[in-house]
Image (cartoon, grey):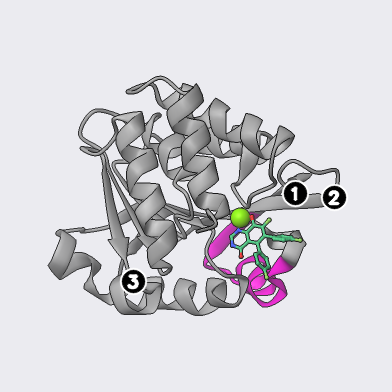
Amino acid sequence: TQSTRPQRLLGAVQKNATRGDPRSVVKAIDEFCRHKEWAMNVGDEKGCILDSVVSELNPATVLELGTYCGYSTVRIASLLPPHAKLITLEFNPDYAKIACQVIAWAGLEDKIQLVEGSSAEWIPKMKEHFGVKMLDLVFMDHWKDDYLPDTKLLEDCGLLRKGSVLLADNVICPGSPDYLKYVRRSPRYKSQYFRSHLEYTKAEDGLEKSVFLG
Ligand SMILES: O=c1[nH]cnc2c(O)c(F)c(-c3ccc(F)cc3)c(-c3ccc(F)cc3)c12
Ligand SMILES: [Mg+2]
């Protein structure tokens, strides 16, 4: 039977990356997506912006919405301090199966908790189920139409504190205009646009970094 693109991406990781070396996993995926098959990872250009936000923040608790094949999951987790935790939510079971194996190849199982399900279902369960008090960083990379409702859900669930950072991918392509309007207009956020390109292409895209002011 035909393999899927995520399966072929995993194959490229297992063939070209070194077990236990997260940066080689990131590199292997970028090479695969640039030279073999495009895939919707945040990619190397926006990935560098992601790295700088994570490194500057040094977060203890990270929530990623949208795991896909685990590229940004591995990229973020490889920069976290020793006892920091990353919870990543993926709705698609096929993506979750691949991401689990990419995370294992990178040797980051201890830092990452992969949960299969919807953000709407799991955000309200963060505190009771994962013992999460507050989120230091939320990387939003799931579905453009869910960015705004999930942001409001994070606020309502009391998961954001003064200084919590929301970092949203694809705010231009495909774009999340209602989300952008909300975080840019709200007095409760300090928002900043990092202009970049759609992964592995010349099309414009960017990341929006929004600091919750409490
Ligand atoms: O859905 C996404 N989630 C997370 N990140 C994404 C991402 O980083 C992307 F680059 C794209 C993208 C953008 C342009 C394009 F032509 C194809 C896919 C998508 C996306 C957008 C619309 C869809 F119908 C399917 C996928 C996503
Ligand atoms: Mg994306």
> Nearer the N terminus, badge 1 or badge 2?
1
What is the C-alpha distance between the residues marked 2 and 3? 31 Å
Q: Is residue 68 left or right of residue 96?
A: right
Does the numbered disc 1 mark a residue whose Cβ is under 8 Å from ligand 1? yes
Instruction: Pinpoint residue 95: horizontal percent, then vertical percent.
Output: 44, 58
Disc 1 + disc 2, Cβ < 8 Å:
yes
In the picture of the structure, the residue carrying the numbered disc 2 is 203
State yes or no: residue 116 in magenta.
Answer: no
What residue type is disc 2 on? Ala
Q: Which residues are magenta?
A: 175-191
Q: Quadrant of the C terminus?
A: bottom left
What residue type is disc 1 on? Leu
- Quarter of the rendered structure image containing ligand 2: bottom right
> Nearer the N terminus, badge 2 or badge 3?
3
In the picture of the structure, the residue carrying the numbered disc 1 is 198
Q: Which residue does the image show at 35% across and 40% down from the upper left?
A: 103
Does the numbered disc 2 mark a residue whose Cβ is under 8 Å from ligand 1? yes
